[in-house]
Image (cartoon, rainbow, N blue to C red):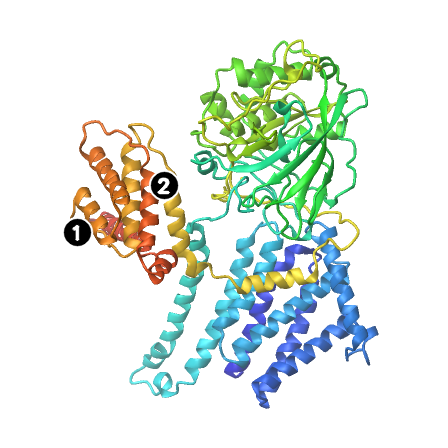
Amino acid sequence: MSGRARLALFAWAATLMSACALLPLVDPATWILQAAVLLGIQTMVGAATRRIPLARPLTLAAQAFVTLMLLTLSFAREQALAGLIPGPDAFRHFADLLRQGGDDIARYAIPAPLTSDGIRLMLVGGVLVIGLAVDTLAVTFRSAAPAGLPLLALYSVAAGLSEGAGDWVWFLIAATGYLLMLLAEGRDRLSQWGRVFGGAPRSPGVESASAVAPVRTGRRIGVVALGLALVVPLALPAMSGGLLEGTGAGVGSGTGSGGTISAVNPLVSLRDSLNVDEDRQVLSLKTSSNDLSDMYLRIVSLDDFDGTTWKPSKRHIVGVPDEFPTPTGLSPDIKRTEIDTTVAAANWYAQDWLPMPYPPSGVNIKGNWRYEPVGMTLVGDHGQNTRGATYEVKSLDVQPTAEQLASAPKPPAALERDYTKLPDSLPSVVAKTAREVTAGATNPYEQAVALQDYFSITGGFEYDTQVQAGSGSEAIARFLKDKQGFCVHFSFAMAAMARTLGIPARVAVGFAPGTPQADQSVSVGLKDAHAWPELYFEGVGWTRFEPTPNRGSVPSYTVPDSSGSSLPDVARPSAGTSTSPSTAPSASESCSAQLKKLEACPSESAQAVAASGDDGPKWWMLLGWVFGGLAVVLLPLSPMLWRLRTRAVRLGAHGRTEADAVPHTLTVWQELTDTAWDFGIPPDESLTPRKAAARIVALGHLDPTTAAAVHRVADAVEQVLYAPRPRPTAGLADDVRRVHVALRATVGRGTKVRALVAPRSAVRVAWAASEWWTGVKTRAAAARPNLRKPSGQQS
């Protein structure tokens, strides 16, 4: 087999191996056999035309024409001339199939049934198009390396639509195919070098060693590259935002295409959001309700508890109805009032789920939104989010009495079964504590009130946003022992304990009541972010409780002797006027994580029952994924991403006590010197902090105000290094930000771009890696003599 034929074979194999990433999307996976056969025919046509040989453009044209005939024969033979030659009718049929495939993608959950010719055409046609691009680049134009971009695009489509389970396996398979193709091209090039590697050997074994050495080197490089591709992304900083930040990467993250609901975990990267310095306004609302204390804005409910965290169950979504159905379990005997609320979202707040009062009875909003009936929530589709949106919500102010809740009948068996599920990994102390707290309660309502009072009043719990969110099955047990946490701890613990008592429970995530303004509006900020438990009572439905002390408002029906008809409480801002850090979750850890990215980043998805019409994803959305994959440039931007993340972490920390004054001050000083380095002032480790500050001021041509900020940081460094008792200094992070702005204003455009895209201080990553490797070698060398026996020692 010639070198070019071998390369074509490996290009065919690499495309198929990358296409394996699509296998989890449909069931059964028999389409891959059809794609393999058609792709093989396409490859053989290319090999034949190159052997003639034809000009490169003619080779590409021949392969494209044969590919079109193959697709026509497979999917549109009845509309084609002689079953092979496509005409206008065949192209119209292709368009209908692609439209049908888009609707089916929105209709079915993953894996979708392979009963649709539309889905099959998308899969097989997409593989053939990618295969044509790979064959053209790698074989026709003899450039295998760029052929990795189409393969990456194919993998990106699968990774974007799948639920994430086992993605690393498919990546490994696809990467292996790509490396094999590179190896085949390398061997083909080496074979053309003649006697340099193929001449007569000077001694036995010389030729073999010299000829094989480059191949072995290529293999080693390939293995190292593959290892880096798998490991390096784990170390790169995550740049996604949080549940309540304006990055669109929180609840319902993703494009929304295909009717997918992405799961959230409100624990991801929580501390970053808790310590925001500025309480930015997220939403502004005007409402007809007289009781602002109950104006909670709900984003999504978390009802699937796996012992580690809470997340939404997979749910179908449909078109938004004109009027929402009556909430589950709400009987006509319960007093209710319909209220009108107009909500305006900030231009920076890009949330995929729509914050609304619960339970909603109707929504008037423009854009591509879908309705999830079980949770009565709206989720954006085709990348729709709340950025700058203004919408009107009709909702019910349900006003049950304590007597009605206490006399609630047993819930339906199916609902009780679904919402009282508990994993075996849940520590026994959770159920034990629940029984102890509710001892003496005679019904589920009294048990729920006892749990709420235990957390908010009698249990000795403290609201503390500095507590780590925690993860794992022991997180709730640790919280019950330490008795310190924020809304996530309280809501998660109460919901889990309620389930141990047989009370259906879930957790809601959204915003607590905001702050009334002079213009009769209500301002909802980042620090109003909140989580609370909802318990189910037959006849009333899902009912809010508030176990978190000093947050939100205690429901009137949980107060002794409450009739539910008392005058409304004056609205109490939950955090708008408080100095306590925000509870806004973030997604910067993935899954780190961060709901990475509250807890790590698992993303559950649910396919929807699509509404009639054209609101389902179109075939061109998949093409958008392809071109998006071609635009992947993460690696060149990694220095910038690392620098931005490092700056945010360094300046986001707080030195509030004497214990953390030293690390905080030194971290801020390092950020100041690295900032100066990025703008062309390299650090001089031989200078004292005071002299280094003077050097930065002089070389940076800083104005007196900024110079004073530099010296304040230097003075703080000397104070924590030499004072008998280091003291925290306030405002250091703001001083560094001021210096960054001033240095940026004094340099040219080229320096600004380099400081952003290729910051000089990013070399610290290489230094850290070098130090780590040196330490590894040193420890290995030190351990090696211990493994050897002294000379002369007998075994």
**What is the secondary structure assignment of the residue under circle 2?**
helix
Please give the name of the residue rendered at 39% of the width and 39% of the height, measured from the top-left corner.
652
Residue furthest right in the image: 78
Viewer-proximal residue among 119 and 706: 706
Residue 762, percent across and down? 33, 54
User: In which quarter of the view is residue 21 placed?
Assistant: bottom right
Q: Is residue 704 visible?
A: yes
The quarter of the picture where the N terminus appears is bottom right
Residue kind at label 1, given as amino acid type: Gly
User: In which quarter of the view is residue 36 placed?
Assistant: bottom right
Question: Count the marks: how many?
Answer: 2
- Is residue 266 shown left or right of residue 446? left
Q: Which residue is mark 1?
A: 792
CB atoms at circles 1 and 2 under 8 Å apart? no
What label sits on residue 651 in the rendered view? 2
* Above or below for 67 versus 119: below
How packed is label 2: few (under 14 Cα within 10 Å), some, or many (20 or more)? some
Which of discs 1 and 2 lies nearer the camera? The answer is 2
